[in-house]
Structures are given as structure tokens and as C-alpha cells.
Image (cartoon, coloured by chain):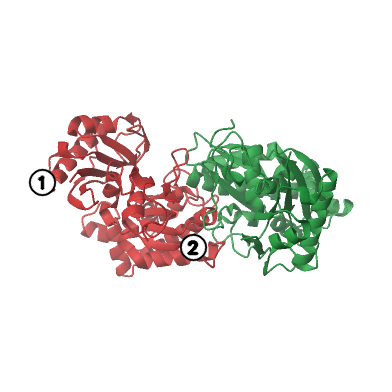
Chain colours: A red, B green
Amino acid sequence: MASFGGIDLGGTKIQAVIVDEAKQVRGSARGPTPTSGGPGAVAASMAESMREAAADASIEVDALGGIGVGSPGVVEDGSVTSARNLPDWEGTFPLAAELQQELGPDVKIGNDVQVATAAEFHLGAGRPFSSLLGVFWGTGVGGGVILDGRPWRGRGGAGEIGHMVVAIDGARCTCGRRGCVEAYAGRAAMELHVRKLVDKGEHTDLLKLAKEHDRPRLTSGIWARALEKGDPLAEKMIERAIGALGAGIASAINLLDVEAVILGGGLGVRLGPPVAKRIADAMQPHLFADSRPPHVEVAALGDLGGAIGASLLVAPLAGGGEGASARPPRAAA
Amino acid sequence: MASFGGIDLGGTKIQAVIVDEAKQVRGSARGPTPTSGGPGAVAASMAESMREAAADASIEVDALGGIGVGSPGVVEDGSVTSARNLPDWEGTFPLAAELQQELGPDVKIGNDVQVATAAEFHLGAGRPFSSLLGVFWGTGVGGGVILDGRPWRGRGGAGEIGHMVVAIDGARCTCGRRGCVEAYAGRAAMELHVRKLVDKGEHTDLLKLAKEHDRPRLTSGIWARALEKGDPLAEKMIERAIGALGAGIASAINLLDVEAVILGGGLGVRLGPPVAKRIADAMQPHLFADSRPPHVEVAALGDLGGAIGASLLVAPLAGGGEGASARPPRAAA
């Protein structure tokens, strides 16, 4: 039985998996994303994680039928440009060629959010639907669009739901613009806002919890803990984030009228179904066709979804095609 | 040579055209939309306009190869439901059957904005592109989506760009919701706002111009005249509308990354290229991929676009298919 590799290249971690033809995970490994050394150091760490995942699955890397990579930044012909969350990665780096030389098998690169959306569509919470919007709520807010069973990428940059505008002249976004969904809901933007408020004298246990758990950042786990403890500022910030997500996702639904929204990402998965319900409630007053709201479901593949989705770039799906375009619409209800 | 009929059913007027196989307009007629008498009276007026257009083209109505209708409201299987701008049309009315019985030829009904978008895509300003967003700026703000040469309708309600949210808890929209693009840019919403401001003592020549030109409403022509005269309130209101349109359309582009935006509708066509340029400028600060903004073009078919688009529901296009799905992508650059 053939096996395939998948790597999810994130801003803080590199997740590698080995899947078999049935898309079952046979091995996995995770390592930190290097914070220095540029694209070369990142590629070396990716190769290392892939070798560890292969060892975990008791298989040789060069026996893999291919390796798929989900990457941030602009992905084109195996190269990655302007991966802003990665060290010294402003220019273009031939990531596929580098990994292929290092590891052996063919390497294909896709957009991280698009491959994660494809994974949920083919194998996860999106299986009952033929059209959906993947919303990945973490450090930023990313999105993937699947229409009639196929990914819609536009001119290559579609899916930026985090940068849909919910407040003209609103809060400053980490992208530099104003009033984007991500300006209110992105974990990075929320942390900046919290630190500013604390400097102004507001009280919260968020920063104390991060220190106690030895986290340099307000991770999804820290947010979850603060909410469990009823921290008022944490609750206020999450409510504000949900309001922005609700308006932005409802706008996307008014434009596209897809059947479902799949909520993933660190915060989406960690806060889970209760927060998906709150987002659905926040969408409702903005939905034009409000008598038939879309389904809002939490991503089913959890932390491994991105890497599994990356493996779909090289692993043939039942139906024969490549990647997210293979499953016939409504086939898997 | 076969001929086909097209009817654009609007809230204030009914526009009928006769086109030939080459989609050239051979005859046309226009009448007011009845303000009372319900769907039956509207259907009778539509039949009358179609007969006049046929006479204008020197052809018998029952010799037509079919009649297409672009209608507001929810269109399903030849019936129209909840056409809010039309008199007593809250329920469902079998418009296709009624017109067919009255006129003879087969009748097909489509959504008014979707057929107008199809017309611009196949025959108008959208011809050089394979994916685009039609934005119809008039009494309301409607939209149509074409992706890879095919209309995207979602579950039937896609394209509501006028109800994308640009201000959470923002201005009240004529749809009852808050902060929609249409709440700032729709002619109906703008008129309500102007009348409220005038009641509060603000000065404008808009209402005087409407009276002078015997218009019960602030039509697109009245807005154009007030802008030409430099009326400060008119300019302020249009600037506000352009800001909302810029943010909403940019959000749609961030999500879909289509090649072009075609600006139609009464105000869009009347204010023309200068306002299209201003909308493009207003989009720019919100575009995520701001180095390659989409083309923003004014609809080329003018007032007849909706009726011509309706005729495409029944007139075969070169390529053989039906309606907007027939043109192969990028075929007509």
C-alpha cells in the first residue's frame, strides 16, 4: 500500500504526517519552526520532521509516493514568496525543489489554509456538503472556499475572509489596514489590544496565565483557560472577536450562499462547538436569507488537518483527480 | 433568423426587448410598473410591453423562439415569491405560466441581477474576463457572481453584495438589518437619509430639483444634476455611498479574487466612469492583494442590459449552452 507525506508549515510549528491510500494517519512528528536562519533553516527543519514522521510510520522517506506541503505566503510553481510569519522570508524561495533534493520524493506545495479546507471537505466536517467556507481562526483569520466540490482560488488569492471589512475606519489590523475581521478576531491583534489595555490599567489574568504556563504569547490554550476562569476582559475580547467573525462570515454567506461554514484554527478548534454556536448566533442578524442559515461546524481533523490536507496534494483521492477537486459534489453525505 | 424576447421587470418600469440570434436588439418598449392590482396587473403590463416591442421589431409575438424574464424576488420553477418592490407580491405567483398563456411562446424566469450580470459577461463590459462581480447600484445594491465563465448562485441566493456588512451596528438598512452596503449606498436609503437631514434643517437642492423635474423620488438623474451643480449634501451622500461600496466590493474581492467588477444599475450607469474610478480608489485601501486590483468597468449595455440578459435565458449563445454558462472562459478577449 502506497504512503504519502504531508507537512503543515506554521508560524510556530511544523507538523508532518504520513498517510496511507485510505488517508489514515500512519505516523506523525512535530517540531518548532526555526525563528532564525531564513528559508534554508525552515526547509531543513521540515525535512527533519518528515523523516521523523516516516520513522514513526516505519517507512523510508524515499518510498513515499510524494510529499505535499501547506505553506503560508504566496505559493506559485513550488516556490513560496512573502511568508510573513516565517523568519527572513520576504523574497521567493524554491521550497519544493529544496525539499525534493533533500528527501527524494516529488514535492507539491499549496496554500496552508486551502489544503486545510480541502482536508475538512474530503475527510472531515465538510463531507456532507458540496459548497463550503473554511474559516481558520488562530493567530490570523484565514479562509478557504469550496464551490460545487472544487476549491475556488480566483487569481490565486481568494479566501481572505480575515480581511473582509466589518468596520470602515475601524481598528488597525496586523495587515496594516483598518476594520478587517482579523483586526478584532486574530489572536495576534487581540494580544496587542490586551497588552495596550493592561498598560492603561485594565485588569486581566490573561498575561499572568501565560507566564504561569511558560508561554511567551497568549496561545489558544491560555485564552481557553482565562474564559473557563471567567476573566472579564478575556470574555469581552472574545465577544468582540465573535461579533466581527459573525459579521464577516455572514457577509461571505450573503455573497456566496454556500451550505456550510467549517470553523478551524487554533482558537476555533480549542473553543469548539460552544463558540461555533455563538458565531452562528452572531451571523444570524446579518444573514440576508435568514430563514435558512448555513451549517456552522467545528473542523473535525483537529491539529493534524493542515498536514493531512497537504498530503492530499499528492495522494490520489477516490474519484481519481488531484487534491480538493476530486470528490464529486454531495457524494459523501 | 429566429428572434427572442426579453423582459426586465423593475420596481418602477418594465423594459421589453426583441433580440435576434446575433443578440442584436431589433425592437424595444417600456412601460411603467403598475402600482396596484397585484401580480396579475403586473403580468398584464409585461405582456403589453412585450407585444409593443414585437410590433417595434415588426414580428408576431407567437413567432418568438422564447421569452426570458428577469425578475426581483425569489425565482423558482417559473414562479416569483416575495418581490418586495412590486405591488401586493408577498406570496408566490406563477409568472411564467401566466405570461406563456397570455403570449404563446415558452417563458423562462431568472433573477433580475443575475441575468443583467450574464448580459454584461457575454455581450458587454465583462467580455474580456472569465470571472467577475456585477454590482448594480440603484434603488438597492444588487450583485451577480460569475466564476470561470459560469454564474454562481449558491443555494439560489448568492450575490447579495448590497447586504454585506461594512459597519457592525451601523446605519439601518431598508432590509431592516444594520450596516449593510445598501444602508449607505442604496438610492432608497440615501433618500430617506436626505429627507431626515432636511427635516433637521440641513440644506440641499436635491428635493427642489426633484420637484422641478416632476419626480416623486430622487432618481439617478436628480442625483446627477445635484452633483453637477455642486450641491454639498448630495456630494457628501455620494461620497459616503462610495465609501461603503468600496469597502463592500473590496471585501468581496478579498474573498473571491475575481478579475473584474462591472458597475451597473441606475446610479452606476448614470454617474459612469468617473464614479467607477472613485469606487476603485475607495476599494484600494481595503484590498488584501493591493498590487493587482481588479478591473472596475461601467456596464456597457446601459438601460437595456437587464432585458437583453433576460433574453439570454431562452436565446442560444454561440457555444450551445443555456444562459450565462455557455461562453467558454476567456474566449472573448
Is residue A201 placed above or below B288 in the rendered structure?
Answer: below
Relative to residue B40, is residue A265 drawn left or right? Answer: left
Relative to residue B204, is residue B140 drawn left or right? Answer: left
Q: What chain does badge 2 belong to?
A: A
What residue do we see at 61% from left, 54% from top?
B162
Query: Along the line of sight, which residue is nearer the eye, B66 or A65?
Result: B66
Can marks 1 and 2 be said to lie on one chain?
yes
Q: Secondary structure at mark 1?
A: loop
- Specify the amino acid type for callout 1: Ser
Q: Secondary structure at mark 2?
A: helix
Which of the 4 image quadrants contains residue B99?
bottom right
1 and 2 marks in contact (CB < 8 Å): no
Is residue B125 placed above or below A138 in the rendered structure?
Answer: above
What residue do we see at 73% from left, 63% from top?
B98
Quadrant where the image shows the C terminus of chain B: top right
Give the distance between the C-alpha atoms of the residues marked 1 and 2, in whole angstroms. Answer: 46 Å
- Is residue A217 visible in the rendered image? The answer is yes
Q: Residues within 10 Å of mark 1 (few under 14, many from 20)?
A: few
Chain-order first, disc 1 or disc 2: 1
Query: Along the line of sight, which residue is nearer the eye, A244 or A191?
Result: A244
Quadrant where the image shows the N terminus of chain B: top right
Q: Position of residue A224 (x, y in %)?
A: 30, 63
Which residue is label 1 attached to? A58
Which residue is label 2 attached to? A283
- Say how many tags the image has: 2
Query: Along the line of sight, which residue is nearer the eye, B250 or A215?
Result: B250
- Specify the amino acid type for callout 2: Met
Relative to residue B90, is residue A112 drawn left or right? Answer: left
